Image: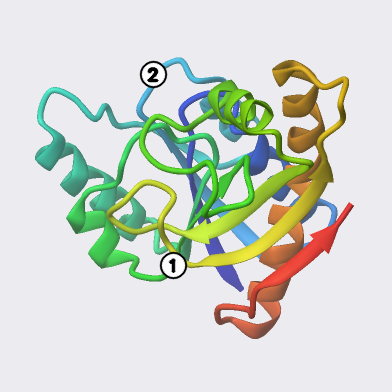
Amino acid sequence: MIKLGFLASNNGSGMRAVVSAIESGDIEAKACVTISNRKHAPALEFARQHGLSALHIPTTPDEEIADRRLANALLGTDVDWVLLSGYLRKLGPVTLDAFKDRILNIHPSLLPRFGGKGMYGRRVHEAVLASGETESGASVHLVDEEYDHGMVLAQVRVPVLTSDTPETLERRVMSAEPGLYVDLLKQICVSRSLPMISDNIS
């Protein structure tokens, strides 16, 4: 059974969806550990309540030490895949090397558009609306040394309405994200390898 580790800075909504899918039997995997750079992140309390190890590993002041601690914590729980769920820190080379092509992130746009440094949260949706796009969505991609840069594995599309504000567009994209993560994890658990890119229209 594939073992999963999660990195989250705040609520970890993607992590919650995956853990719920595991508990319901929808995904055949084991959720092992949640790690946050914030000591009081709600994701850590959720992890404890659901039987996962919950660890706080700050990324400052020494990022190199934090990188080694993060890699060792993940290796110590013997996880196969690492899922980022609103983890607002760039991963270091030790962690990236230890889990090469086995770290996933979900981003609230149709990458490669509207990704990169500083493009997170509501900023993404503000940029989408300012550009006049007629659709947006979410992407799951492999994590590498650059922000939102790794190979895209799955996407879901949602319409951009003429009446949208950044808040309404954010809610629509967020509602589509959990299912995208869960569906991709199902494929990985069955094939135990990277799936071909899928594009789900909603």
Image position of 72 (left or right of 21): left
Give me the residue at 31% from left, 51% from top.
Answer: 146
Amino acid type assigned to the residue bearing label 2 in the image? Lys
| Residue in the image at 20% along x and 45% along y | 67
Residue farthest along the front direction in this orientation: 132
| x, y percent for residue 90 | 31, 41
Where residue 47 sits, quadrant-wise, is top right
Percent across and percent down for residue 10 are: 52, 23
Q: Is residue 190 above or below residue 43?
A: below
Q: Residues within 10 Å of mark 2 (few under 14, many from 20)?
A: some
Secondary structure under the numbered disc 1 in the rendered image: loop
Q: CA distance from mark 2 to mark 1?
A: 25 Å
Front residue of 59 and 157: 157
Q: Is residue 105 visible?
A: yes
Residue 26 in view in this figure: no
Residue at x 56%, y 78% (from the top left corner): 194
| Residue in view at x 61 percent, y 73 percent | 1
**Residue 78, percent from left and from top:** 40, 64
Mark 1: few, some, or many residues within 10 Å (few <14, many ≥20)?
A: some
> In the figure, is residue 54 to the left or right of 95?
right
- From the viewer's side, name the closer residue of 87 and 109: 109
Q: Quadrant of residue 134?
A: top right
SS category of the residue bearing label 2: loop
Residue 39: numbered disc: 2
Q: Is residue 112 above or below residue 116?
A: below
The residue identified by callout 1 is: 102
| Three-letter amino acid code of the residue under disc 1 | Arg
| Disc marking residue 188 | none
Comes first in the chain, label 2 or label 1: 2
